[in-house]
Image (spheres, rainbow, N blue to C red):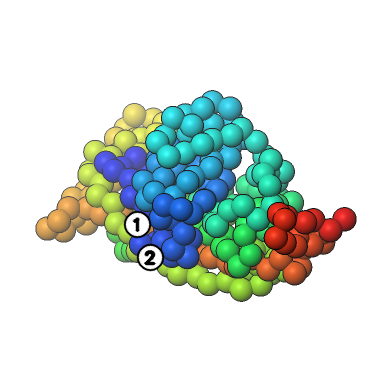
Amino acid sequence: MAVSSTPRFPSDTLEWLTAGCLEPGYRVIVLSPTVSYCRTVACHGADVLAVHRDPDTAAKLNRIPGVVAVCGSPESLPLNPCTFDAVLIHQGFHELAPGLVLPEIARVLRPDRVLGVSWLVRDDTVPWVKRLAALLRTVDDHAMSGDYGTDSVQELASNKYFPDHEHISKRLWVSVDRDSLIAMASSLPAVQDLDSESRSELLAKVAALANDSAGTSGLRLPYKLECWRAWVDHNELTTPIRPDNNGLTITL
């Protein structure tokens, strides 16, 4: 949906996801991030390593102050064991292979450090959003019915490498104007396929809904930020990692 702005990831939520490991002196991995999300993480002062499959995106991430980016696979991290304090994944955990990526994350985390997983999802329980969805579904049964992938977090909740986990949910609001809603509706293929008269009638209803739903502060689009954090347990690794005074020993 086209909006006039996008939600900024709250700093206190990032602190929660990393269990306080965002300050200078800590090392954080961000897997498959957007540029804006990676920039938000890096501004807190920790040393940030971004890993992205796409070389062009990795190049853009590498230009962010405080970020070193590499082109690579999250399921096969080119990193030494026990060298990072937190790993973050936003909007992308469901696109990874949990059986491969979770052991890799466990391997590179220091003992008792944390993996933070999050999704920003539209809250369709708000009445005006439900009315908008019902209106658009008169021409497209699947309008505003996106699958965000949050169900995949069950793979983390049941994973032996991360036995202890917590969840929080936060409501965020984004300002949106009538023209943005009309533009969003106009962009739907089913709306574009309507004849001119039917399309104009539908868009007029969208405009009327926006006018009727806007309060004194204008129209606001609701989101929920769903967040999970889990602590690594190295005792469950198939290949145990044992730090000693001379460095790192990996039992084969």
The residue sitting at 60% across, 67% down in the picture is 112
Q: Residue furthest front?
A: 246
Q: Residue furthest left?
A: 216
Of pointers 2 and 1, the one earlier in the residue sequence: 1
Q: Secondary structure at mark 2?
A: strand
Residue 55 percent across, percent down from the top left: 58, 27
Pointer 2 and pointer 1: residues touching (CB < 8 Å)?
A: yes
Give the total number of marks visible in the rendering.
2
Q: Nearer the viewer, residue 33 or 211?
A: 33
The mark lying in front, picked from 2 and 1, is: 1
Whether residue 111 sits left or right of residue 44 in the image: it is right
Residue 245 percent across, percent down from the top left: 70, 60
Q: Nearer the viewer, residue 142 or 102?
A: 102
Label 1 crowd (10 A; few <14 / some 14-19 / many >=20): few
Dividing the image into 4 quarters, which one contains the C terminus?
bottom right
Amino acid beneath label 1: Pro
Whether residue 222 sits left or right of residue 16 in the image: it is left
- Residue identifier under label 2: 170
Dividing the image into 4 quarters, which one contains the N terminus?
top left
The residue sitting at 77% across, 56% down in the picture is 249
Q: Is residue 43 visible?
A: yes
What numbered label is drawn on residue 10?
1
The residue sitting at 44% across, 43% down in the picture is 38
Q: Nearer the viewer, residue 197 or 238?
A: 238
Whether residue 240 sits left or right of residue 147 in the image: it is right
Q: CA distance from mark 2 to mark 1?
A: 9 Å
The residue sitting at 15% across, 56% down in the picture is 217
Amino acid beneath label 2: Lys
Q: Secondary structure at mark 1?
A: loop
Residue 132 percent across, percent down from the top left: 34, 53
Label 2 crowd (10 A; few <14 / some 14-19 / many >=20): few
